[in-house]
Image: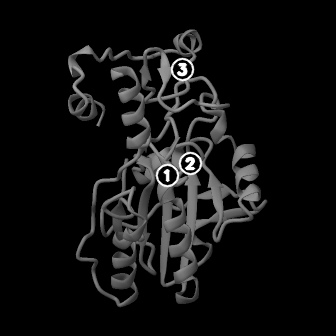
C-alpha cells in the first residue's frame, strides 16, 4: 500500500511523546507535513534540525507538522516509545508532536520507506509532495528546500513543481 | 570514500575485506556497533564509545559535531596515513 500524489492520506490515531493522542483529521490546517523519522538513523539526525526549523518557520502560516517513528523497537531499542520521550525531553522539546506507530500500520498505509521520508498534504489532506527534505543531508544550507517549495506552492493554491523525490536515509526497520 | 583515500595514500583498495554481519549473535561476536564500521589494523576509525552492539545504522560525528552516516573524511585519512607510516 502507498498513497499517490493527489490521493487523500489515510487517517491515523497515534500516541505522542507529549502524552496526547494525535489524529490526522482532527485539524484542517492550510497544509500538513507528516514525516517519518527515528532516533538512531544518521540521515534522520542530520536532517532533523532543518525539519524542526521548517516547523517553526511555518507555524504561523497554518501548517501542521507531525513526526512519526515506525521502527521495530524490539530489535532497535533506541527507537522505543520510552526512548522517544527521553529524547524529546533531553532536547528541550520539539516544535511539533513526535508520534509512535508501534504496529507499523501507518507506515505501510502511507508507503513510508525511509527515515526521513516527508509527506506534504493540502487542506483537503491530499498528498502533494513526498520524498526527501532536500538534495543533500550533509549541507545544512539546503534548509529542507524541497519541502518548503512544496509548502509554498500548496499555500498558494498551486501544484508543487516537484511532486516527488526519492527519499534518502535508512530503511524503516520492519518487523 | 575509503577506496579513494586508500589510492590517494598509496594503499591498495583491493586489500579491503568486506564483512556482512547478519545476526545479533555475529554482531556480539564481532563487537559490531553498527553499519558501516571501518577497522584499520583492527582499530575502529572512530572509537564507538558507548554505542550499542547490534544490527543498527551507525551514527558518526563529524569533526564539527554534525551527525553523519560516514566517518569524517579527515579521521579516515589520518587512520590510513598512520598505517602507511
Residue under label 1, please give it: A44
Secondary element type, mark 3: loop
Mark 1 packing: few (<14 Cα in 10 Å), some, or many (20+)? many
Q: Which residue is depicted at the point 44% across and 78% down?
A: A124
Q: Which chain carries label 2?
A: A
Q: Which numbered dot is residue B32?
A: 3
Residue under label 2, please give it: A38
Location of residue B32 by image quarter? top right
For the residues marked 2 and 1, what is the alpha-carbon distance in whole angstroms?
Answer: 7 Å
Observer-nearest residue: B78 or B2? B78
Residue closest to the far front = B85
Secondary element type, mark 1: helix
Secondary element type, mark 2: loop
Q: Which residue is depicted at the point 41% across and 25% down?
A: B82
Q: Position of residue A42 (x, y in %)?
A: 49, 45
Image depth: mark 2 or mark 1 in front: 1
Q: Which numbered dot is residue A159?
A: none
Location of residue A77 by image quarter? top right
Q: Which residue is depicted at the point 34% across and 70% down?
A: A146
Same subunit: marks 2 and 1? yes
Q: Mark 3 lies on which chain?
A: B
The mark that comes first in sequence, 2 or 1, is: 2
| Vertical side of A116 occupied by A161: above or below | below
Amino acid at each position: 500500500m502507498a498513497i499517490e500524489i493527489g490521493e487523500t492520506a489515510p487517517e491515523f490515531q497515534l500516541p505522542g511523546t507529549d502524552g496526547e493522542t494525535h489524529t490526522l483529521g482532527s485539524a484542517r490546517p492550510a497544509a500538513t507535513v507528516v514525516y517519518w523519522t527515528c532516533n538512531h538513523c544518521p540521515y534522520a539526525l542530520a536532517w532533523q534540525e532543518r525539519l524542526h526549523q521548517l516547523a517553526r518557520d511555518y507555524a504561523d502560516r497554518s501548517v501542521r507538522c507531525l513526526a512519526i517513528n515506525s521502527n521495530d523497537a524490539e530489535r532497535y531499542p533506541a527507537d522505543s516509545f520510552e526512548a522517544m520521550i527521553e529524547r524529546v525531553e533531553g532536547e528541550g522539546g520539539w516544535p511539533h508532536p513526535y508520534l509512535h506507530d508501534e504496529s507499523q500500520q501507518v507506515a505501510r498505509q502511507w508507503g513510508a520507506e525511509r527515515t526521513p521520508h516527508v509527506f506534504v498534504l493540502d487542506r483537503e489532506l491530499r498528498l502533494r509532495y513526498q520524498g526527501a527534505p532536500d538534495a543533500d543531508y550533509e549541507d545544512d544550507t539546503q534548509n529542507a528546500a524541497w519541502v518548503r517549495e512544496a509548502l509554498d506552492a500548496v499555500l498558494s493554491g498551486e501544484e508543487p513543481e516537484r511532486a516527488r523525490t526519492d527519499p534518502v536515509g535508512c530503511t524503516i526497520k520492519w518487523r | 570514500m575509503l577506496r579513494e583515500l586508500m589510492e590517494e595514500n598509496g594503499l591498495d583498495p583491493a586489500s579491503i575485506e568486506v564483512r556482512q554481519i547478519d545476526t545479533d549473535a555475529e554482531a556480539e561476536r564481532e563487537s559490531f556497533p553498527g553499519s558501516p564500521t571501518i577497522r584499520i589494523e583492527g582499530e575502529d576509525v572512530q572509537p564507538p564509545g558507548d554505542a550499542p552492539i547490534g544490527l543498527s545504522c551507525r551514527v558518526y560525528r563529524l569533526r564539527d559535531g554534525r551527525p553523519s552516516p560516514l566517518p569524517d573524511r579527515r579521521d579516515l585519512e589520518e587512520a590510513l596515513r598512520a598505517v602507511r607510516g
